[in-house]
Image (tube, helix red, strand yellow):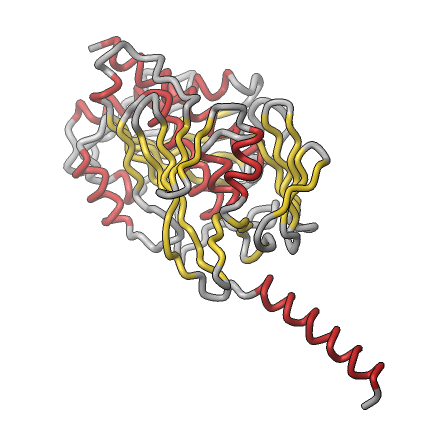
């Protein structure tokens, strides 16, 4: 082989090596985690760290959602656009760095997009997050800890929020993918991201205790979910699901309780007794369903919705007040946004938070 041929082969090997480095997340090794602590409420959240070719990576969407940072994911082109305060950030797969207000910031390794996840080196935190956070975040590199200095605990009288417990059940998970959404991802992914984001802002803004029935993409049986819910003795159980426009008959969302069909115009409808569930729990569930539904509808004027009865196994024998919220995958809150990604996902979780907050406050005010 001549010199030119050797050089060409060497270049091909180099390019192939780079491709392997970018795509080599076949079996991620979760070697560590980053702890995010909200100073206002002392609530903490763990972001898993993946060890890849000697570099620590984190899942960028998880970090942004928890910190309430607006973002859009252009999955087709492998780019995440981040908008925070007056700053514009862009990170792209295969690039060892990101753009902050048009200026290149270097990372120690390349960003990776794979299997509906986007990974960035932990360098993202000190190099980009700290610069755009404008003093709202602090980074302790020795302990892999982010301090969120921006949160406030408000909205409920002092002392009351500390007594509240909410259980959130992200629909599906693991082997159960749920529905394939028009946006090109599985329902289980959106329900978890919505639930995780909702849990974080309930903790940081209201200071309530929140339990999740699943902590990731794992298979959890209905019985296991009910065990978590009943053992918590929570004030409220919320299940989150998505449906197609056809499934919901054009409604923006439906809220399900166990019993006879109830609509917003029919507040006097009688509920059937739940299996092994006290009558007081039935009444509280309907009260929360109405409060949450009315509050959600106010964020999207003109939205059709209803409270419906379905013989759902998850509601049978539930010992705490609870309901299932099924959102139309085309549903929009605060503008025409895809609820399954970026700003649409964040704003949908905000709408759910506002609705649940109003319902919890109303319930406590009646006590």
Compared to residue 258, the image places residue 183 above or below, namely below
Which quadrant does the C terminus fall into? top left
Q: Is there any visible trace of residue 138 in the rendered image?
A: yes
Taking the spot 39% from the left edge, 31% from the top edge, the residue there is 147
Taking the spot 75% from the left edge, 80% from the top edge, the residue there is 9
Q: Position of residue 42 (x, y in %)?
A: 30, 27
Taking the spot 69% from the left edge, 71% from the top edge, the residue there is 14
Foreground pick, 307 / 125: 125
Q: Position of residue 98 (x, y in %)?
A: 64, 43
Taking the spot 63% from the left edge, 70% from the top edge, the residue there is 17
* Among the 4 quarters of the image, the one containing residue 165: top left
Which quadrant does the N terminus fall into? bottom right
Q: Is there any visible trace of residue 245 in the rendered image?
A: no
* Among the 4 quarters of the image, the one containing residue 161: top left
Foreground pick, 259 / 330: 330
Direction from residue 71 to residue 101 in the image, left or right: right
Foreground pick, 203 / 111: 111
User: Number of numbered discs present?
Assistant: 0
Foreground pick, 63 / 291: 63
Q: Residue furthest bottom?
A: 1
Q: Position of residue 273 (x, y in %)?
A: 20, 31
Q: Position of residue 224 (x, y in %)?
A: 24, 49
């Amino acid at each position: 082989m001549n010199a030119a041929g050797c050089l060409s082969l060497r270049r091909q090997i180099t390019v192939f090596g780079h491709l392997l480095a970018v795509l080599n997340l076949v079996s991620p090794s979760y070697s560590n985690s980053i702890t995010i602590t909200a100073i206002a409420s002392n609530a903490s959240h763990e972001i898993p760290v993946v060890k890849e070719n000697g570099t620590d990576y984190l899942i960028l969407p998880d970090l942004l959602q928890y910190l309430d940072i607006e973002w859009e994911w252009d999955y087709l082109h492998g780019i995440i656009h981040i908008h925070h305060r007056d700053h514009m950030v862009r990170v792209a797969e295969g690039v060892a760095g990101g753009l902050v207000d048009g200026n290149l910031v270097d990372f120690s390794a390349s960003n990776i997009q794979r299997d509906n996840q986007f990974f960035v080196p932990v360098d993202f935190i000190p190099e980009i997050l700290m610069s755009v956070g404008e003093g709202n975040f602090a980074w302790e590199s020795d302990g892999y800890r982010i301090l969120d200095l921006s949160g406030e605990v408000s909205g409920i009288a002092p002392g009351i929020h500390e007594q509240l417990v909410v259980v959130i059940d992200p629909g599906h998970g693991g082997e159960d993918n749920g529905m394939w959404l028009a946006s090109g991802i599985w329902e289980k992914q959106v329900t978890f991201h919505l639930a995780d984001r909702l849990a974080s802002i309930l903790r940081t803004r209201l200071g309530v205790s929140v339990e999740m029935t699943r902590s990731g993409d794992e298979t959890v049986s209905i019985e296991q979910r009910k065990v978590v819910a009943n053992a918590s003795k929570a004030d409220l159980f919320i299940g989150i699901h998505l449906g197609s426009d056809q499934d919901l008959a054009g409604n923006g969302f439906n809220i399900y309780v166990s019993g006879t069909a109830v609509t917003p115009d029919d507040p006097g409808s009688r509920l059937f007794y739940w299996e092994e569930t006290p009558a007081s729990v039935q009444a509280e569930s309907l009260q929360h369903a109405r409060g949450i539904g009315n509050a959600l509808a106010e964020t999207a004027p003109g939205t059709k919705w209803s409270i419906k009865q379905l013989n759902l196994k998850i509601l049978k024998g539930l010992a705490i007040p609870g309901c299932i919220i099924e959102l139309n995958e085309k549903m929009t809150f605060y503008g025409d946004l895809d609820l399954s990604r970026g700003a649409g996902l964040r704003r949908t979780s905000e709408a759910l938070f506002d609705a649940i907050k109003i319902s919890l406050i109303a319930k406590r005010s009646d006590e």
